[in-house]
Image: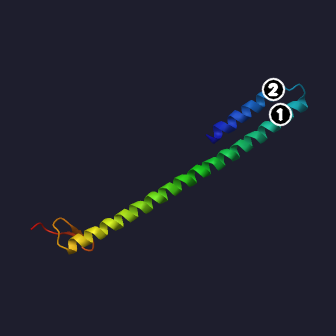
Amino acid sequence: MRIRIAALTAVAALSLGAAACTQAEQEQAEADASAAGEKAGDIASQAGEVIEAGAMKAAQATEEVAGNAADRLEDNQAEAAAEGRPGAVNPATDERVPAN
């Protein structure tokens, strides 16, 4: 995406430069195209970082929710195993409570 934006900006600027009448105008148009391409690349890079940061935050939130769920399930299984409920697994030993 970053390359595409920079390329489109450079092509547009070079197209304008090709229509310039004098050598000085052409050189200025090329310099403007180069600067525009660099600016577009910088903006695309920043946008990529924002997207990546958002994905990181989403992954961290998912990890936290999954960890909380695992803790609750472990507590429930520990309680069920301590009560001797058939099928429960004691998290400390990984042993299943046998059926009566």
Could you say which quadrant of the image residue 70 lies in? bottom left
Q: Are marks 2 and 1 in contact (CB under 8 Å)?
A: yes
Residue at 65%, 48% in the rendered image: 45
Residue 68 in the image: x percent, y percent? 39, 65
Q: Quadrant of the C terminus?
A: bottom left
Residue 81 in the image: x percent, y percent? 21, 71
- Reading the image, the residue beneath label 2 is 18
Q: Does 13 appear above or below 76?
A: above
Residue at 77%, 27% in the rendered image: 15
Amino acid found under the numbered disc labelled 1: Ala
Which one is in front, 64 or 12? 64
Quick one: SS at disc 1? helix
Sort mark 1 into few (<14), some (14-19) or many (20+) by Cα contacts within 10 Å: many
Q: Quadrant of the N terminus?
A: top right
34 to the left or right of 59: right
In the rendered view, how is the structure colored?
rainbow
Identify the mark at residue 29; answer none if there is no mark.
1
Residue at 57%, 54% in the rendered image: 53
60 to the left or right of 91: right
Amino acid found under the numbered disc labelled 2: Ala
State whether residue 94 appears in this view: no
